[in-house]
Amino acid sequence: MVDHAPGERIYQGAEAVLTAALFLGRSAVLKQRTPKAYRLPALEHQISRGRMRNEARLMRRARAAGVGVPALFDAEPESQSLVLEYLGRTSLRNEYDSLSSAGRKNAARAVGEAIGQLHGASIIHGDLTTSNMILRGGRVHFLDFSLGHISDKAEDRAVDLKAFKDSFVATHLAHATDLSVVFDGYAKSLGPAGQKVIKQIASIERRRRYA
């Protein structure tokens, strides 16, 4: 599939617009936050600037830990924009179901290992879905850290992983059993702490069921 041309809109979301661009001759993505009209301009500027800085900080931390994320080429707090490495046109969501059985298992394992690596760097993504992942060269790269934060708590990790579980089942229902491979990869990546997180998911589900 042909990559996005510079100037082509990649995605229009509630929080930001993504546009293909060039940065010093390299393919890039311009992420521009969308102002919220219902907020006072000064408050909107403060909130958006803080979120952009947080996202940039988390991406730098993830990359330093060896987690697959786009390179951060530039950050402009005043214009509330990021310039990121362009990783490709297709998210894992759009290609997962069309993979072969072996391809899906490899992708599922790579997803679990990558989430474990992310959590091992004390990063909670906040929106773990296959829409926010790109599979490139057998390696999972994470996108959109706008809802992320720093935490080593098993509960926070479990909430993050459970959100991925719920999203995966809703999006890839025909292959929901692949979650066991995701969890195997996660436990392998994070070790004993990973097993604790997986057990914590069951505890969260029980609490919500009887709440």
Image (spheres, rainbow, N blue to C red):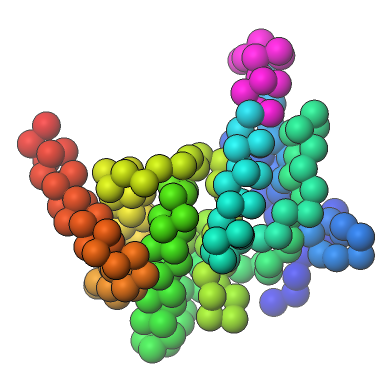
Task: Indicate the quadrant where residue 35 lies.
Answer: top right
Magenta segment range? Answer: 38-49
Q: Is 20 left or right of 143, judged from the image as shown?
A: right
34 in magenta? no
**Quarter occupied by the C terminus:** top left
Residue 171, visible in the rendered structure: no
> Who's the residue at 71% across and 14% down the image?
41
Q: What is the count of numbered marks?
A: 0
Residue found farthest to the left? 210
> Who's the residue at 73% across and 63% down the image?
86
42 in magenta? yes
| Residue 91 drawn above or below residue 43 | below
> Who's the residue at 44% across and 63% down the image?
117
Residue 30, position as x, y percentages in the image: 77, 49
Task: Indicate the quadrant where residue 156 lies.
Answer: top left
Residue 171, position as x, y percentages in the image: 38, 60
Q: Is 38 left or right of 163, judged from the image as shown?
A: right
**Quarter occupied by the N terminus:** bottom right
Task: Indicate the quadrant where residue 88 lies.
Answer: bottom right
Would you say the magenta stretch is mainly helix, strand or loop?
helix
Q: Is 24 left or right of 152, judged from the image as shown?
A: right
